[in-house]
Image (cartoon, rainbow, N blue to C red):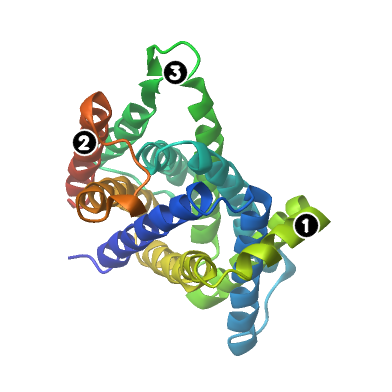
Amino acid sequence: MNDWILPALLSPMLFAVVTLIDKRILSEFRIPLPSFNLFVGASQGAIGTIVLLTAPGEGLTALTVVSALGIGVMQGIGLTFMFWMLKREDPSRVIPAMQTSPIFVALLAWPIFGESLSGYQWLAVVLAVSGGMLASLGTSGTTGSYGFRPVYLVLLISALLMAGSQLLTKSITDDLATQQIVGFRGIGLFIVMWTIFARRSSLLGLRIFLSKPRQAPWLLLSEGAMPFAGHLLITTAIGRGPVGLVAAVSGSRPIFVFSLSYIGSRLAPSYIFEKLTGRDLATKLASAVLVVTAIALASTV
């Protein structure tokens, strides 16, 4: 197995767990979304600062530092859109729609990095994107009709930003160590989140939430060390392998979200905030199957 495939799979597996915990925090615990975003920015900024203090690097150029910070800026804006959708929609719909980013990475990796994909690998990208588009089908809350929901176009913007951040990551892997990239990324994310959401009411809402001993640990778990570990894994994969294929394989996140949601709905339904019955279940299952097939094809040489 290529040495980039394992970290490229472990990252979405970890982020699938993060997604389900985040959904519970937003839907059951009802933390205000601006307060939630403030914590995301603060935790990743703090971890990023600690990492850079332990591995500061030498001879860094201004362009390299700005590029590394830009990764966090792009992801911060993209995550803002994703969290807004996650608060109102099922995780197994939001995440597949987000995974349309591999097509943008694959299309741009060729002119930028000279990476070319085989016919099977291009098919993998198409299947991954198709799975994401399928997840956007659902019942409209206003008309009651079943079909494409325009609100999911918000996630297209998020996917574009995530694709851009992965390409930017690839462009500086020769100039910075993996932990340095992740460190600067955390600081860039902090800058975005606190610029947008640092208001008195948001800070008060975060303080109140963190004072609740039965709820605060969930937030510390899902938006503390776990995202840092996930981004360390995906950055490692991007540094080792073709960014187009890494993006496609990291698109396995929907199957993990779907599988964990389905298992959780049977074993601990009070922890899962998903509709997994009837047509919704069939649509999500079909989306997950497309993504699994895409992973198998993307792993071919």
- First in residue order: circle 3 vs circle 2: 3
Tell me which label, 3 or 1, sits earlier in the chain.
3
* Amino acid, disc 3: Ser
**Position of 233 relative to 284 (above/below):** below
- Residue under numbered circle 2: 285
Q: Could you tell me the amino acid type at mark 2?
A: Leu
The residue under the point 37% across, 23% down is 138
- Disc 1 marks which residue? 198
Provide the secondary structure element on which disc 1 rests: loop
| Residue 164 x/y as whole percent | 54, 47
Left or right, residue 133 beside residue 6: right
**Mark identifier at residue 114:** none
**Residue picked out by circle 3:** 140
Q: Which is nearer the eye, 104 or 214?
A: 214
- Crowding at mark 1 (Cα within 10 Å: few <14, some 14-19, many 20+): some
Locate residue 283: give its quadrant.
Answer: top left
Up/down of 86 relative to 76, above or below: above
Query: Quick one: quadrant of the N terminus?
Result: bottom left
Q: Which image quarter: residue 55?
A: bottom right
Give the alpha-carbon distance from disc 2 to disc 1, as whole Å: 39 Å
**Circle 3 — which element?**
loop
Cα distance between the residues tagged 3 and 2: 20 Å
Mark 2 secondary-structure assignment: helix
Mark earlier in primary sequence (2, 1)? 1
Q: Quick check: 248 left or right of 79?
A: left
In x, y percent, where is residue 200? 82, 57
101 or 111, which lies in front?
A: 101
Q: Position of residue 231 (x, y in %)?
A: 46, 65
Residue 72 can be seen in this image? yes
Q: Amino acid at mark 1?
A: Ala
* Residue 263 place in picture, x, y as percent: 20, 52
